[in-house]
Image (tube, rainbow, N blue to C red):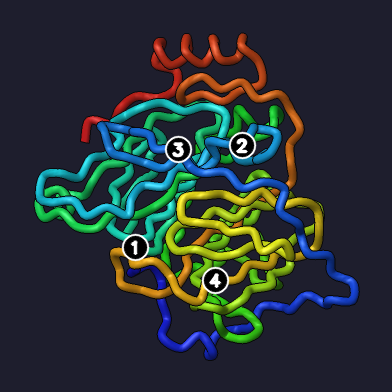
């Protein structure tokens, strides 16, 4: 797996270790499987939050996992120009590369380990397409897209684009050196990521060696979820099994505990590690009305978003 790897995790900063005398381990509330779906021009995804409600995942709205898939020449698909309003899109490329453009002037190529963070806010048009090289040559594609909600007071914020390069992510390891931790946004175990968020959240990508356990402090005011990208692990004191493409919703507490299985399933990169995302944030607690590419608080605001899009008020597609 190309995304931001390091051979010797022991040279990295250690995450703070929870104090077992006072830190409460988060229990497993439920584990649900992702559902296969299709996005954009026809590429397959796993819809990671398919078994959860908006109330469960607040302030997140959606998680799609693309791949891992090996495309041949002229096979890689993307998401052509489309509108958004009322939330933020976060695309984290684990393997491959994607070209992004938007009507607010943001964009560029994001490669392995890079993240693009687009605040749609009041409205924007954008596309996410294979680069010319990937289109011609093919190759591995693996990544996730998250939708992060905005509170009503910020839904009409000006659009914003943040490119977060792999070299900017904060890397750390667990207390015993068995985990490679990449903090994309927010904070975990005393390590802060570079992403600037409108809504208080944390997004963390962890690679966990077979048999290793990670005990990661987590903001007690945040909810928390573990989404398994590849591999298998057990979660919490209950040692609930968490297979690939499943999500564990956790209860209240001060830290997250997860242990990789001793023997990992074969995967495309021939790596033995369990790969997963840690996600959580401060719930917004407002009504969520979603229709297609718009997420607002009321049906009237959804209708207005479609009217504004059709009238060209969400931006225009650049000519070059």
Number of the front mark, 2 or 1: 2
Label 4: few (<14), some (14–19) or many (≥20) C-alpha neighbours in 10 Å: many
Determine which of the numbered discs, if any, sits on residue 52 in the image. 2
> Is residue 128 toward the left or the right of residue 239 in the image?
left
Closer to the N terminus: mark 2 or mark 1? 2
| Secondary structure under the numbered disc 2 in the rendered image | loop
Provide the residue designation for mark 3.
35
Image vertical order of residue 219 relative to residue 126, above or below: below
Closer to the N terminus: mark 2 or mark 3? 3
> Is residue 97 toward the left or the right of residue 76 in the image?
right
Q: Which residue is at 22% across, 55% downward? A: 70
| Secondary structure under the numbered disc 3 in the rendered image | strand
Provide the residue designation for mark 4.
260
Give how far apart the Cα atoms at labels 2 and 1 are: 29 Å
Quadrant of the image occupied by residue 16? bottom right
Q: How far from the left and from the top, in percent, is residue 192?
A: 64, 67
């Amino acid at each position: 797996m190309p995304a931001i790897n390091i051979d010797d995790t022991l040279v990295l900063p250690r995450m703070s270790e929870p104090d077992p005398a006072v830190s409460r381990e988060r229990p497993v509330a439920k584990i649900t499987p992702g559902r296969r779906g299709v996005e954009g021009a026809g590429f397959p995804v796993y819809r990671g939050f398919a078994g959860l409600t908006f109330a469960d995942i607040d302030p997140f709205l959606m998680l799609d996992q693309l791949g891992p898939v090996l495309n041949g020449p002229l096979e890689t698909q993307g998401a052509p120009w489309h509108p958004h309003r009322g939330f933020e899109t976060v695309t984290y490329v684990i393997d491959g590369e994607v070209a992004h453009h938007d009507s607010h002037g943001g964009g560029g190529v994001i490669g392995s380990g890079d993240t693009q963070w687009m605040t749609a806010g009041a409205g924007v048009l954008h596309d996410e397409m294979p680069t010319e090289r990937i289109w011609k040559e093919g190759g591995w594609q693996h990544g996730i897209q998250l939708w992060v909600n905005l509170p009503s007071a910020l839904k009409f914020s000006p659009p914003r684009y943040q490119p977060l390069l792999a070299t900017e992510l904060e890397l750390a390891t667990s207390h015993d050196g068995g985990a490679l931790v990449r903090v994309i946004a927010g904070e975990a175990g005393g390590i802060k990521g570079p992403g600037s968020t409108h809504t208080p959240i944390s997004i963390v990508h962890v690679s966990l060696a077979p048999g290793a356990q990670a005990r990661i402090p987590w903001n007690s005011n945040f909810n928390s979820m573990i989404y398994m990208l590849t591999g298998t692990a057990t979660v919490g004191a209950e040692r609930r099994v968490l297979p690939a493409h499943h999500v564990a919703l956790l209860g209240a507490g001060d830290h997250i505990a997860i242990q990789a299985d001793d023997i990992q399933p074969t995967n495309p990169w021939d790596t033995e590690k369990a790969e997963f995302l840690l996600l959580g944030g401060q719930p917004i607690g407002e009504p969520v009305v979603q229709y297609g590419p718009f997420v607002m608080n009321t049906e009237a605001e959804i209708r207005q978003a479609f009217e504004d899009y059709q009238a060209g008020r969400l931006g225009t597609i650049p000519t070059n």
